[in-house]
């Protein structure tokens, strides 16, 4: 009964892990959830109030397909003030149902079946299945652990064929927390120009980045603005995962096909949520900055603590809220370690394999959880790992 493309779509393994943890909780076990990729804070109150006000003011109706103009203007202002990049609110910005929709749109509206898209490995779980929805072939390039999970432009170029049409970049990265530096990005930008590639830059963790690392917007690299779609959103920095709001910015020739696809798929995103998002961008940034500082303290703690666990070793992630330690020295696979930690320590993580072949021998630990829970989790993991050594 299902289509050929649906047959190729698996359920997300992160969800499988989450469900297994929930099952144990139902049996009365205490589980610490370090598998989920969402901030453990609620949306800042002033953003919530803005959405409530919008509802009270009768903002109950469809918006323009591309989103309310006030939100598109706020997005345009952000890019012009932060990166000196100009995007027209009328024709170069679409408000999407999260970055998740943005990724689906670029694959389906800009590529044809048989085209190839370059995706990082390890990577966020959507890129590969999204490619399958349009019979596009995903080709992996490596994020090298020994280079703090950055790509190597030489290896990336080796993967380019006459069928390669698009390159997906993602920095800071899920699952590694790695941030790609300016020099490497410039080399990759030159490759994109040389090989005439569309660049899609998933910048959802743009503002969850820890000094001295700095975010570089891909569209600001030489030669890229005219060929780049930047995907960004509200889920992480503003802790608005359930609001389902993101945006795509880029030149009109690339945005227009996205908008036509979006129009038939989504119509428009939730109108009163969009009003909340206007306040997110234009209002007080402090609650989000405080959240980011907390993530940084937790990162420092979890990085040091995990490196003391026998068999674990981790680079220092410069962004997002994930640690991606190697567990190779335990002699076990990521899946085995993640299952053992769930069953014996009551700590849910995700096996690195689920993020692509280069994730093998790792687990992903999300530190979007309280310091207290992180400390308890580390203690429990240590006990289990010592016993299994
Ligand atoms: C790299 C990356 N891109 C996109 C998303 C999805 O974001 P959204 O909630 O805006 O759909 C996530 C969520 O975990 C992510 O890690």
Image (cartoon, rainbow, N blue to C red):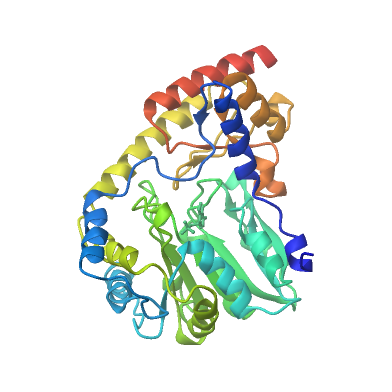
Horizontal relation, residue 153 to residue 32: left or right: right
Examine the rendered structure and indicate whether residue 330 appears above or below residue 256.
Answer: above
- At 62% from the left and 72% from the top, the residue drawn is 107
Residue 346 seen in the figure: yes
Name the residue: 79% across, 67% down: 4
* In the foreground, 342 or 270: 270
Q: Is residue 72 above or below residue 278?
A: below
Q: Which quarter shows the N terminus? A: bottom right
Q: Quadrant of the C terminus?
A: top right
Left or right: 356, with 382 as reference point? right
Which quadrant of the figure has residue 168?
bottom right
The residue drawn where x is 66% and y is 12% is 387
Tell me the residue at 20%/68% (across/down).
57
Residue 71: quadrant of the picture: bottom left
Q: Position of residue 302 (x, y in %)?
A: 46, 30
Query: Which percent across, then down, holds residue 329?
Result: 69, 27
Residue 94: give x, y in percent of width and height: 42, 76
Can residue 389 be seen here? The reply is no
Of residues 254 and 132, the one drawn nearer to the viewer in this rendering:
132
């Amino acid at each position: 009964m299902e289509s050929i493309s649906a047959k190729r779509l698996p359920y997300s393994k992160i969800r499988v892990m989450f469900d297994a943890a929930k099952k144990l909780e139902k049996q009365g076990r205490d589980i610490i959830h370090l598998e989920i990729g969402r901030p453990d804070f609620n949306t800042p109150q002033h953003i919530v109030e803005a959405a409530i006000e919008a509802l009270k003011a009768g903002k109950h109706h469809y918006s323009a397909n591309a989103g309310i103009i006030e939100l598109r203007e706020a997005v345009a202002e952000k890019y012009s003030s932060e990166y000196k990049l100009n995007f027209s609110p009328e024709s170069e910005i679409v408000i999407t149902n999260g970055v998740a929709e943005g990724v689906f749109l670029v694959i389906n509206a800009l590529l044809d079946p048989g085209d190839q898209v370059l995706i990082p490995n390890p990577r966020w779980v959507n890129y590969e299945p999204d490619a399958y929805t349009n019979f596009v072939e995903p080709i992996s390039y490596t994020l090298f652990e020994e280079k703090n999970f950055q790509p190597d432009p030489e290896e990336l170029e080796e993967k380019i064929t006459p069928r390669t049409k698009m390159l997906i970049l993602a920095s800071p990265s899920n699952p590694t927390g790695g941030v790609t530096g300016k020099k490497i990005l410039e080399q990759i930008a030159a490759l994109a120009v040389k090989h005439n590639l569309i660049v899609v830059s998933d910048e959802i963790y743009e503002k969850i980045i820890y000094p001295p690392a700095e975010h570089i917007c891909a569209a600001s690299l030489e030669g890229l603005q005219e060929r780049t779609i930047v995907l960004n959103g509200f889920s992480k920095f503003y802790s608005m995962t359930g609001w389902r709001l993101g945006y795509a910015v880029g030149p009109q020739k690339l945005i227009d096909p996205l908008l036509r696809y979006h129009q038939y798929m989504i119509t428009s995103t939730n109108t009163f949520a969009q009003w909340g998002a206007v306040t997110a961008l234009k209002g007080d940034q402090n609650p989000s900055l405080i959240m980011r500082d907390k993530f940084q303290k937790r990162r420092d703690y979890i990085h040091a603590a995990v490196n003391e666990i026998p068999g674990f070793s981790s680079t220092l992630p410069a962004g997002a809220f994930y640690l991606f330690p190697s567990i190779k020295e335990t002699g076990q696979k990521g899946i085995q370690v993640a299952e053992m930690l769930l069953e014996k320590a009551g700590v849910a993580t995700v096996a690195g394999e689920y993020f692509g072949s280069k994730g093998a021998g790792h687990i992903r630990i999300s530190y979007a959880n309280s310091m207290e829970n992180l400390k308890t989790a580390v203690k429990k993991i240590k006990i289990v790992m010592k016993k299994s050594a």
